[in-house]
Image: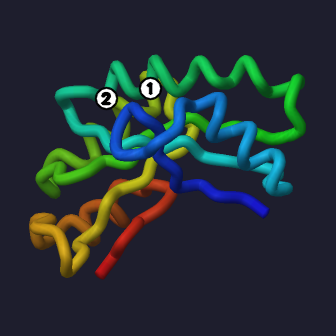
């Protein structure tokens, strides 16, 4: 089992990265993506912090993919921000899509697909 869309205390999750990874391992996961909410204001901080949990690979029996979920980013800024995320070390890039319960800008889904991100979450 894998989960490529999780959050820690660095956004709206409840666990620090190492605890989230350990709990996933206990439940039998073979891989986990840690993809906290990010935009231009916090992307460096998120990737720097969640990447440090890679120290658990080789100790725990789970693959760890640090990344981000680009959230409420204007569609024209998604591709450049996804590129920046990868340059900063993100192994997985998710975009928060046009959910009917949140005011995500129209065009976000298409921009995410055109940017070649890994996952379009909450596409509506």
Residue carrying label 2: 43
Q: At 15% across and 65% down in the image, what residue appears?
A: 104
Q: Is residue 40 left or right of residue 118?
A: left
Q: CA distance from mark 1 to mark 2?
A: 6 Å
Foreground residue, 50 or 118? Answer: 50
Q: Residue at x 43, y 56 (%)?
A: 116
Residue 20 place in picture, x, y as percent = 63, 40
> Which disc number belongs to residue 88?
none
Are the two marked residues, 1 and 2, in contact with CB atoms closer than 8 angstroms? Answer: yes
Q: Position of residue 8 (x, y in %)?
A: 47, 39
Residue 90, horizontal then vertical, whole percent: 50, 33
**Residue hosting label 1:** 47
Q: Nearer the viewer, residue 15 or 31?
A: 15
Q: How many marks?
A: 2
Q: Residue at x 17, y 53 (%)?
A: 72
Q: Residues within 10 Å of mark 1 (few under 14, many from 20)?
A: many
Quarter of the image with the C terminus is: bottom left
Residue positioned 85% across, 56% down in the render: 28
């Amino acid at each position: 089992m894998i989960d490529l869309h999780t959050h820690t205390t660095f956004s709206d999750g409840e666990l620090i990265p190492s605890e989230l990874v350990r709990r996933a391992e206990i439940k039998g996961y073979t891989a986990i993506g840690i993809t906290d909410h990010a935009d231009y204001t916090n992307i460096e901080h998120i990737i720097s912090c969640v990447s440090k949990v890679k120290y658990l690979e080789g100790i725990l029996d789970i693959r760890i993919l640090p990344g981000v979920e680009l959230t409420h980013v204007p569609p024209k800024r998604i591709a450049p921000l996804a590129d920046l995320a990868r340059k900063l070390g993100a192994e997985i890039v998710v975009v928060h899509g046009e959910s009917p319960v949140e005011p995500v800008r129209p065009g976000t889904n298409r921009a995410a697909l055109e940017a070649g991100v890994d996952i379009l979450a909450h596409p509506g």
